[in-house]
């Protein structure tokens, strides 16, 4: 079993920045992708970004491209999401997810096997 714990959420003004972290523990693995998703009230959970095990393959949702940066440190079993130029529409609970399947960079929630509890990000206008 893998446990994922997110941190770094909070309240920020539009145009500001936040850095989310996701620490993995338990039966950690290093062959699968890690992803970030978010869910706003009344909306479905949506893909934000994903990164391969090697860190060389990255995918972003169009809505966050050029503003968010995903990275990972396998030695620390941690994945990060640097969020810059934040907008009110970025307000949501952000979830970290881990995929057991190697060689896949999923953008759908069902493609991920483990999830964190989420961290709230609120961007005020």
Image: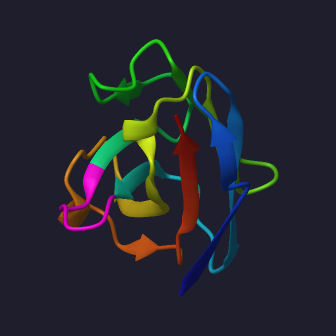
25 with respect to 38 (left or right): right
Q: Is residue 38 visible?
A: yes
Q: Is residue 73 visible?
A: no
x and y percent of residue 66 in the render?
46, 12
x and y percent of residue 101 in the render?
33, 59
Q: Is residue 77 magenta?
A: no
Residue sticking out furthest to the front? 125
67 with respect to 21 (left or right): left
Residue at the image position 58 percent from the left and 29 percent from the top: 14
Which one is in front, 115 or 10? 10
124 with respect to 73 (left or right): left
x and y percent of residue 20 in the render?
67, 48
Residue at the image position 48 percent from the left and 50 percent from the top: 34
Question: Looking at the magenta stretch, what is its main secondary structure?
Answer: loop
Residue sticking out furthest to the right? 76
x and y percent of residue 100 in the render?
39, 65
Residue 119: name its quadrant: bottom right
Relative to 62, say whether 23 is above or below: below
Relative to 100, say whether 10 is above or below: above
Residue sticking out furthest to the top? 66
Per the rendered image, the range of residues in magenta is: 40-46
Q: Is residue 43 magenta?
A: yes
Residue at the image position 30 percent from the left and 26 percent from the top: 63
Residue at the image position 51 percent from the left and 18 percent from the top: 67
Which one is in front, 17 or 118? 17
């Amino acid at each position: 079993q893998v446990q994922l714990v997110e941190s770094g959420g909070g309240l920020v003004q539009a145009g500001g920045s936040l850095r989310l972290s996701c620490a993995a523990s338990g039966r950690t693995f290093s062959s699968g992708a890690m992803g970030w998703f978010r869910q706003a009230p009344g909306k479905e959970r949506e893909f934000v970004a994903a990164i391969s095990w090697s860190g060389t393959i990255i995918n972003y949702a169009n809505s966050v491209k050029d503003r968010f940066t995903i990275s990972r440190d396998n030695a620390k079993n941690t994945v990060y999401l640097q969020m810059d130029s934040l907008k009110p529409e970025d307000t949501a609970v952000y979830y970290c997810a881990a995929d057991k399947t190697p060689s896949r960079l999923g953008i759908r929630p069902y493609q991920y096997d483990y999830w964190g509890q989420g961290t709230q990000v609120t961007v005020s206008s």
